[in-house]
């Protein structure tokens, strides 16, 4: 059963290497600031867009889609 013993040894080594990599990634994530990836700083108020601004953006997007689809649109 030397072959089986070698397989078990290799699998344990791979498991240990995977655990080491997981631990390394965990430490890296812990070192990052809390706000990473949130898009805004904590404590800052959210920005709100007026209805008029949303309408202008929607109208512009509709016009772009119409031009791409060949319907004119402005």
Image: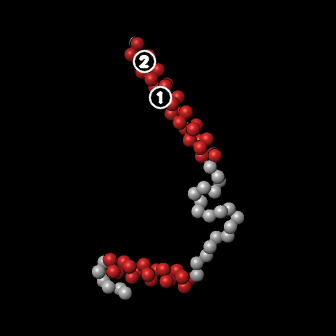
At x 40%, y 13%, the residue is 2
Q: Which mark is residue 26?
A: none
Residue that extends furthest to the bottom in the rendered view of this protein: 74
Q: Quadrant of residue 24?
A: top right
N-term mark: 1 or 2: 2
- Can you say whether 49 is above or below 28 in the image? below
Residue that extends furthest to the left in the rendered view of this protein: 70
Which residue corresponds to mark 2?
Answer: 6
> Viewer-proximal residue, 55 or 30?
30
> Viewer-proximal residue, 33 or 51?
33
Residue that extends furthest to the right in the rendered view of this protein: 43
**Which type of secondary structure does the marked residue at label 2 adopt?**
helix
Q: Where is residue 62 shown, x and y percent of the image? A: 40, 80
Are the two marked residues, 1 and 2, in contact with CB atoms closer than 8 angstroms? no
- Can you say whether 40 is above or below 18 in the image? below
Q: Quadrant of residue 4?
A: top left
At x 44%, y 16%, the residue is 5
Q: Where is residue 1 shown, x and y percent of the image? A: 40, 12
Q: Residues within 10 Å of mark 1 (few under 14, many from 20)?
A: few
**Which type of secondary structure does the marked residue at label 1 adopt?**
helix
Q: Residues within 10 Å of mark 2 (few under 14, many from 20)?
A: few
Q: Where is residue 34 shown, x and y percent of the image? A: 65, 53
Which residue corresponds to mark 1?
Answer: 14
At x 47%, y 20%, the residue is 9
């Amino acid at each position: 059963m030397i072959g089986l013993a070698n397989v078990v040894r290799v699998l344990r080594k791979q498991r240990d290497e995977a655990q080491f990599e997981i631990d390394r990634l965990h430490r890296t994530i812990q070192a990052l600031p809390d706000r990473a990836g949130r898009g805004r700083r904590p404590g800052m108020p959210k920005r709100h867009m007026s209805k008029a601004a949303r309408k202008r953006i929607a109208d512009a997007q509709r016009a772009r889609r119409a031009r791409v689809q060949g319907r004119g649109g402005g």
